[in-house]
Image (cartoon, helix red, strand yellow):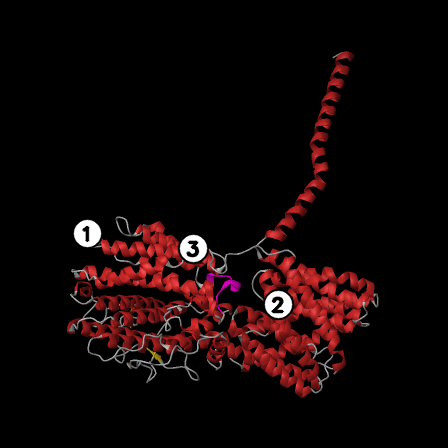
Amino acid sequence: MDGTDGRDAAAEAEATEGGSRATRSRRRSPALTSGPVSARSRAAAAIVLLRDGTGPVPAAARRSVRVTLAACIGFYGFLHLLDRPTAATYALFAAVALAALARIPGTGRQRSAELVSALPVACALVTVGTLLAVRTWTAVAGMLLIGFCLAFGAAGGPRPAGTAPGLQLLYILPCFPPYAPGELGERLLGTLTGLVLLILAEAFVLPDPRVPSYRDRAAEAVRAAARCAAVLREPPYALPTAVSAHAAASAQALRPSSVPEAERPAGPGVRERALAHTGLAARTLLSRLRALPAPRPGTRPEAAELRLTRSVERAARETAALLAAGATGEGAGGGEAARTLLRVRAESADHVPCAPADRRRHAALLEVADAALVLGTAADIAVRGRGAVGDTDFGRFWYARTGTLRLWWIRLVGNAGPRSVHFQNAVRISLALGVARVVAGLDSLPHGFWAMLAVLSLTRTTAVQTRSTVRTALIGTCMGALAAGSVLALAGEASTLYAYLLPPLMLVAFTVGPVRGVGWAQAMFTLVVAVVFAQLAPATWQLAEVRFLDVLIGSVIGIVCGLFAWPRGAHDELGRAVARLLRAAAADVAATTKAVSSGAGPLPDRDDDPGVQHALALAETAYAQYQGEAQRAAGPTPDWQGALMSGHHVLWGARRVLTAAADGSPPDPRADARLRAYGAWVAEGFALAAARFDVPEGPRAEAGPVAGSVVGPVAGSVVAGGEGGRVSRGGGAGAGGPQASDSDLDAPPLFFTTTTWLDSLTVDLTRMAAAHAVEGPVPRAVPGSAPGHRARSRGSAPPGPDA
């Protein structure tokens, strides 16, 4: 190769290399220039997530921004601008108490509305705490009374329950020395300022995304019911799988466990009770539509049946429009479809099909119509309140004509006893707070309110949960105390540094704590309070040591009190409550079926049985708490929810059967005897189920297989030989149970109405039996626990206290 060729090759290589460098440069340049763009994109995405995210982290971050903003504006304004340290302290702790310590459910605007109603109570608590700080015993007495009342207010629903811990802190803070009634004005000024700032922040800063309300869910469920009714008017007069599945999903969406806590209609007011009634009626209507028997093969429904189904569809659409309308129902229908349904239902009731097999479908259709009518009335009261009350059935909708104070009184009285988990929780927390106040007062505990704050925030409803929480909290507090001690030792009295540190610390603390758990929450809050108190007075690293000591003392008090006050939480009480419910249901079933048999005497009052209603309310309250408690895995668990739903089915069905019996029907000795036998059989099944669910107080009941004292094939029993949950279909001891011949019996319509109800209760008992069959031997029934068969007399008291 000559020199020319070498130079050409070198030039070509250089050009190639240069081109490669240029190419690499061009490839790198977008990456270099996109760095800031990418950072801006990530920041924008983070802001969008903060504003619109629905997960736990974005929700906690939004709340953290609000509480930090409200607390810091009040604290810095009073401390550094106005030189009012007392007002600054109360402004900060008022915002922190009601935003971080309190657990008010819902969106920011829902919480702000709750905070507005809590303002007078907060000011009253600060005043009472200031005045009772004169002596330790007065402060302790106030703590016991106020602690109990605020905790017992949880019977009023999730929002009062969530507000209670924050309000308790507003009594705890001023009830410690020094006794300074002269500072009451400053304390009230700070409290009001902090809460007003918090209300504004919750309402206007980073609004939470809207979630479907319970009314929205109910409206969707009613629309699903209307679609089912429309489909059932067309051949083959049965629901397709997809339509049935959608109806089941719509009903599932109304279950309390599927509804956000803030949206559950759990309060004692008229509208909340009516909305809960609406949800139950919608679920019942969907269930009845899905279970509607098809016409006999080769036949089509009669014109009267199709007309009734069409009326149900129109009434359901009218109810859905009412629920979807504004707060007052403006723009919704005027109830014309409901009045039409009532008229068509009365006409259909007078038309009795000739074939016995058609009478069962006829009875089921009348039950569908009744459910739609109840749904419409309940929805009307839920939307319009007492303004909707006209010719409302007082028994079923007894709350519609009862004053608000009376409704609250009924709710509180219904829970005022050791059988209520709300009462148990109130006794437990007030006792622990009272003991903590005694210890803090007698030992002159520095910053003793921290010990009470530990009791308030760490005590759980079960001793096991409290121990687990305390262990994690002490580790977190220790880590936080070490970090706080280091900061205080290094920064000394540099108050400006503390002022800069507080806002970011609060942002991190109130974001990380709710997401990462109690250990992180205690660690970060220890840092926050150390930085706060370092700005109020000179502080050393020993402040962190005091904080850890106080949390340790409060934790020990919480553990000890938890061991003595219902240490198992709602577990045992739930079993007892469900057993009481099932015994009351057994008595109601036996009394109802006996009463509707011709010649059995006057019919009982059609008002809901107050015994079943009260037992059901207490059992549902216990179950709601039980779901929030950590339970030890111990194999299969009872079907708690099935037992609760059976209580609703007893109430609903008994009322409908008694209503149908009031219309009168010709006596039929054979049908009457069959009803009495079937009713006694189902009642026996409820009695046996009650024995299985019950948790005796004191020594446990002897366990063993069911012997001759209980009829073997009763629904809900376990048949000897190991076939759990098998229900007898006739013969022997189980002859009173469901019979295939029931559908062909030439009997009056009332017979089919009653047997349809008893069949649904048999299904409930079978489900409960299936859950119990794998749990082991059955507790022997306690003597005297069998249900009485005494019918309620006409004119009995209206529904009693609920929970």
The three-letter code of the residue at mark 3 reads: Ala
Across and down, in percent, residue 601 comes to: 23, 80
Q: Which residues are magenta?
A: 257-266
Which residue lies under the disc numbered 1?
Answer: 299
Mark 2 or mark 1, earlier in chain: 2
Q: In the image, residue 541 lies at what x, y percent? A: 78, 71
Q: Is residue 592 left or right of residue 60?
A: left
Pointer 2: residues within 10 angstroms few (<14), some, or many (20+)? many
First in sequence: mark 1 vs mark 3: 1
Residue 567 visible: no
Q: Nearer the viewer, residue 133 or 464?
A: 133
- Residue 321, numbered label: 3
Marks 2/3: CA–CA distance: 32 Å
Q: Amino acid at mark 1?
A: Thr
Residue 251 within the segment the image draws in magenta: no
- Amino acid type assigned to the residue bearing label 2 in the image: Leu
Reply above or below: 103 against 14.
Answer: below
Q: Nearer the viewer, residue 521 or 174?
A: 174
Q: Nearer the viewer, residue 206 or 419?
A: 206
